[in-house]
Image (spheres, rainbow, N blue to C red):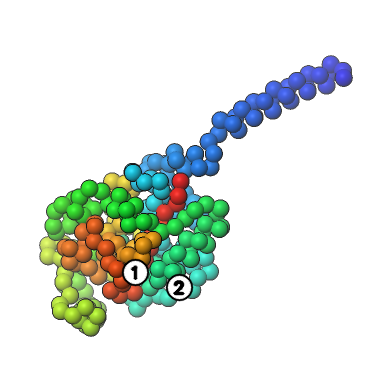
Amino acid sequence: MNMYWKIHVTLLGAICASLTLTQCQQPSDGGRLSEVTRENPHINSLGMKFVPIPGTHILMCTTETRVAEFQAAGFTYNPPWYPQGGNHPAVNIQWSEAKNWCAWLSKKEGRTYRLPTEQEWNAATGPFSYTWGDNWPPAYKAGNFAGQEWRTAPAVDLQQMKELWKSKVGGQWSLIKDYHDYQLYTAEVSSGQVDGLGLHHLSGNVWEWCESQVLKGGSWVDGDREVLKSRYAASRPLYDFDNGFRCVLVK
Ligand SMILES: [Ca+2]
Ligand SMILES: [Ca+2]
């Protein structure tokens, strides 16, 4: 080997050694997920953002699953009777559909997506009675619930909601006194304030399925102070038109 090639082989070896070292120092895929923070969330192939939940081994999506994300799987979306856009939360979702959607995304990305366990969902809500603290009514802009915005809703919409409640639940539909969130039906999933972990609409907007087939968080239909407590779990849907889900990514 002449001097020219000797120099190049030596240089190439040094570069390869350097590359190998660099690769060895790079965290594994799982390692990168473990380094995700609220400020530096993991963003998946659909543009969904995931943040860590203290005390768990999962990253939680910062938003409820959007209509457009649900449809990206090729699943048929059954729209509700009220107006929605692609950035609104998917509703009319059965537990098995939510599970199948997570399985589709897991296969697509080669990662493990699933619904949160009830324990993981509770860990995300924090230590207080509600996601915003212990006070009632909810803090200003705390979420999308059944508030005083309905007092000025079109008469036909208000009447429809009252009749739906009466036929499904019985009694009078309750609106939260001294709370006004300006949103009649579902709100866009990334609208409103985020909580301390970076999550939108964990409480309210749409109910969210857990692995154990309970629903958590209440929805835009709910104004009952017990139902909106973080520990409250509904064993079956009251309506289907306010049932959605939020997925988690296993680290
Ligand atoms: Ca509302
Ligand atoms: Ca919710």
Residue at point 21%, 52% (across, down): 132
Task: Give coordinates of residue 79: x percent, y percent.
Answer: 40, 75
Q: State the SS at label 1.
A: strand
Front-most of residues 52 and 49 = 52
Look at label 2 and name its amino acid: Tyr
Whether tag 2 and tag 1 are in contact, CB under 8 A, the answer is: no
Front disc: 2 or 1: 1
Q: Which residue is mark 2?
A: 77
Q: Earlier in the sequence, mark 2 or mark 1?
A: 2
Q: Can residue 227 be seen at all in this image of the molecule?
A: yes
Q: Which residue is mark 1?
A: 243
**Quadrant holding ligand 2?**
bottom left
Residue at point 29%, 62% (across, down): 216
For residue 3, which quarter of the picture?
top right
Left or right of 95: which side holds 205? left
Disc 1 crowd, CA 10 A, few/some/many (<14, 14-19, 20+):
many
Q: State the SS at label 2.
A: loop
Task: Give coordinates of residue 141: x percent, y percent.
Answer: 22, 56
Q: Residue furthest front?
A: 212
Residue at point 19%, 71% (across, down): 150
Mark 2 and ligand 2: say if the CB distance to the nearest ligand atom is below 8 Å: no
For residue 189, which quarter of the picture?
bottom left
Q: Quadrant of the N terminus?
A: top right
Look at label 1 and name its amino acid: Asn
